[in-house]
């Protein structure tokens, strides 16, 4: 009886973390920032989860293109090259493709916009929108297409 009560409490807590429904085993294990998207639109998370790998890749490419455009970076050559590389299935070119050096390069760029925004899920303080676009590039190239599309 006690075990059943504990199990039910855990199930409800997990469902609460996931927007009201427990995740599929695949979603539970995928890693990444799946909770951020889940808090915004749980039905979308389930739709992405049920999509095939090719569709998940398309979603990941769209999401990063959108993030780069919203951050007003799409007109900069370096970012345009990165988006093009994603579209044709190539590696993101340096400097954006080099996680060890990208941040030094990024913060040294005086011509890039710097816009601070509140995260969509409302946690924490403001974040640099352009830095979030760079992180979206990293997410889009994850090996697991579900993780790439749900980050």
Image: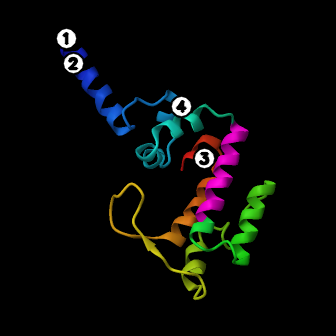
Q: Could you tell which of marks 1 and 3 lies nearer the N-terminus?
A: 1
| Disc sitting over residue 1 in the figure | 1
Residue 141 appears in the figure: no
Tell whether label 3 touches label 1 (CB within 8 Å).
no
The residue shown at (54%, 72%) is: 130
Q: Could you tell which of marks 3 and 2 lies nearer the N-terminus?
A: 2
Farthest residue toward the right?
Answer: 88
Distance Cα–Cα, label 1 vs label 2: 6 Å
The residue shown at (33%, 67%) is: 125
Front position in the image: 99 or 109: 109
- SS class, disc 1: loop
Quarter holding the N terminus?
top left
Left or right, 125 with respect to 136, comes to left
Coordinates of residue 98 in the picture (x, y in percent): 65, 68
Q: Which residue is mark 2?
A: 5
Coordinates of residue 7 in the picture (x, y in percent): 28, 21
Q: Which residues are magenta?
A: 53-67
Distance Cα–Cα, label 1 vs label 3: 40 Å
Crowd around label 2: few <14 · some 14–19 · many ≥20 (10 Å): few
Tell whether label 2 touches label 1 (CB within 8 Å).
yes
Q: Which residue is mark 3?
A: 149
Residue 100 located within the stretch drawn in magenta: no
Farthest residue toward the top?
Answer: 1
Q: Could you tell which of marks 2 and 4 lies nearer the N-terminus?
A: 2
The residue shown at (23%, 22%) is: 6
Distance Cα–Cα, label 2 vs label 4: 25 Å
Main secondary structure along the magenta-highlighted residues: helix
Q: Which residue is mark 4?
A: 26
Tell whether label 1 touches label 4 (CB within 8 Å).
no
Crowd around label 4: few <14 · some 14–19 · many ≥20 (10 Å): few
Residue 58 located within the stretch drawn in magenta: yes
């Amino acid at each position: 009886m006690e075990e059943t009560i504990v199990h039910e409490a855990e199930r409800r807590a997990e469902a609460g973390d996931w927007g009201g429904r427990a995740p599929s085993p695949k979603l539970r294990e995928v890693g990444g920032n799946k909770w951020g998207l889940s808090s915004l639109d749980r039905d979308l998370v389930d739709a992405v989860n049920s999509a095939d790998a090719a569709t998940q890749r398309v979603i990941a490419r769209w999401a990063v293109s959108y993030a780069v455009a919203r951050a007003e970076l799409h007109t900069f050559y370096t970012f345009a090259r990165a988006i093009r590389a994603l579209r044709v299935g190539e590696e993101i070119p340096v400097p954006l493709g080099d996680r060890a050096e990208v941040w030094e390069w990024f913060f040294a760029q005086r011509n890039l916009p710097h816009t601070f925004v509140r995260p969509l899920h409302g946690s924490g303080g403001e974040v640099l929108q352009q830095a979030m676009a760079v992180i979206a590039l990293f997410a889009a190239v994850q090996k697991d297409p579900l993780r790439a599309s749900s980050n």
